Amino acid sequence: MKMGYTRYEKAALLDRIGKIQIERQGDTVVTKYDGRVLKAVPVSKKYEVFDIAKYLAERIDDIESNFAISKYRFTLTRGVQYLELLSDVIDIDGQRYYKSFYILNSSDKSRVLSFNSGLYCEDSNFYIISKANAAGITKKHLTGVTKAANDASEGLSGETFDEQIASIRSLSGHRVAFSKLKEAIVDSDAQISHRKFDAFKNSIRWSRGLSLNKEQINLLLTPSEKIKEIDAGKDFYIDAMLALQTYLRIFNRQDSHVIKNESERIMKITQWAVRNAALESLGI
């Protein structure tokens, strides 16, 4: 999820995609583009060559039948192929979101095949992908991957994004306690969970409009692994939409299946979000 977007012109995009050629030569899979060899890797007997050019063309047709594609991003790096499509624009809390589709494949065994749909917020530059969406797959290139990929694409419809949009809108005008954000993000004592929370803390402390006392600032500066309990006197509330955006922006350069997992993690805050009016009545 990098670089800029190109205005969507189907014929031009299909021409680029059509130049991808992946073939098996004995125990080696060779990736070519426009006749030029990009990568050759040894594979096992269980490896199934996936025709990504055909799959991308078919998915474009499927998506066009329900959505108005406006922009795309297509990258080809040796043995990795990635396509991102942006379609219908919706407004959530005054910000522009695109209904989006992400397809990643590798013919060099470096990445799993993944196809996901979600939302891209242009104004705040972050992605959110919900497991609630019917369409989606993350699978290794082993026997059966082609059938699994085709089956996973059957869930695409105009209702694909409804639940996700409703969940995000439910956060508008709400705040969530810092302690609850820690509970959502640090869901195990694994070091990776603590690193994610530290990255979130480092980002959120620079947010405008966040009024904190000295103890609360020190809390943000404390390594996650050393934060065992957050006392009520040190706890504070953060705008729920700001928390969502800040956390997911950390994963902008990750594959869509990673963003999908992190979206599910941070969306737990919907169960703890409190209306601003209710907090204000308590003087918070």
Image (cartoon, rainbow, N blue to C red):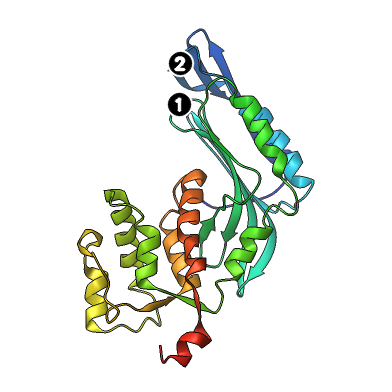
**Mark sitting on residue 43:** 2
The answer to whether the residue labelled 2 contacts the one labelled 1, judged by CB atoms less than 8 Å apart, is: yes
Residue lying furthest right in this view? 65
Residue 216 appears at what percent x and percent y? Answer: 26, 78
The residue that appears at 61% across and 75% down in the rendered structure is 94
In the image as oriented, which residue stretches furthest toward the top? 26
43 or 222: which is nearer to us? 222
Q: Is residue 240 left or right of residue 116?
A: left
Numbered circle sitting on residue 109? 1
Q: Position of residue 105 (x, y in %)?
A: 54, 33
Please state which amino acid type lies under the numbered disc 1.
Lys
- Quadrant hosting residue 205: bottom left
Side (left or right) of 124 relative to 70: left
Taking depth in this image into account, of 192 and 268 the one nearest to the observer is 268
What kind of element bears circle 1? loop
Q: Residue at x 64, y 63 (%)?
A: 165
Q: Quadrant of residue 184?
A: bottom left
Question: Where does the C terminus fall, quadrant-wise?
Answer: bottom left
